[in-house]
């Protein structure tokens, strides 16, 4: 899952092409805008909760940045 507002799906797929070749498998990214991610996290969406419950590879920020709406981090 990629959370952010600046990338389109086609841009992400293009950026992942070399990594797919190195891994020898297809990567199917899920993109989510920040506001939508926060809303789903606050609603305890099963997919989002599953993602944040797994080991994360953060490209920017930290796990402390993942805060449910209405709570301070």
Image (spheres, grey):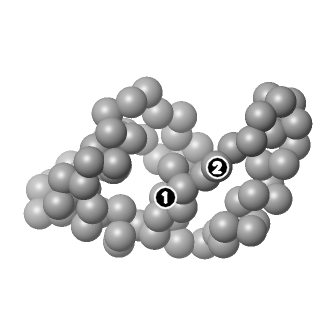
Q: Along the horizontal axis of the image, is 60 left or right of 67?
A: right
Q: Give the side of residue 20 with respect to residue 69, left or right.
A: right
Q: Residue at x 49, y 58 (%)?
A: 3
Name the residue that disc number 2 marks.
28
The tag earlier along the polypeptide, 2 or 1, is: 1
**Residue 68 image position (x, y, % from top left):** 20, 55
- Which residue has dot 1 on it? 3
Q: In the displayed structure, does residue 8 sit left or right of residue 55?
A: right
Q: Quadrant of residue 40?
A: bottom left
Q: Secondary structure at mark 2?
A: loop
Tell which of 39 and 29 is nearer to you. 29
Number of numbered discs visible in the structure rendering: 2
Q: Secondary structure at mark 1?
A: strand
Residue displayed at 47% across by 47% down: 61
Checking the image for residue 34, the label placed there is none
x then y, percent, for residue 72: 15, 54
Q: Residue at x 77, y 49 (%)?
A: 16
Residue 46, position in %: x, y?
Answer: 26, 48
> Residue visible at 18% across and 53% down?
44
On the image, the x and y values in percent for residue 21 come to 88, 36
């Amino acid at each position: 899952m990629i959370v952010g507002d600046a990338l389109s799906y086609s841009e992400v797929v293009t950026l992942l092409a070399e990594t797919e070749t190195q891994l020898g498998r297809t990567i199917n990214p899920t993109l989510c805008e920040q506001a939508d991610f926060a809303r789903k996290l606050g609603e305890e969406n099963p997919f989002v909760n599953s993602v944040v419950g797994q080991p994360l590879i953060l490209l920017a920020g930290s796990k402390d940045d993942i805060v449910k709406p209405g709570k301070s981090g």
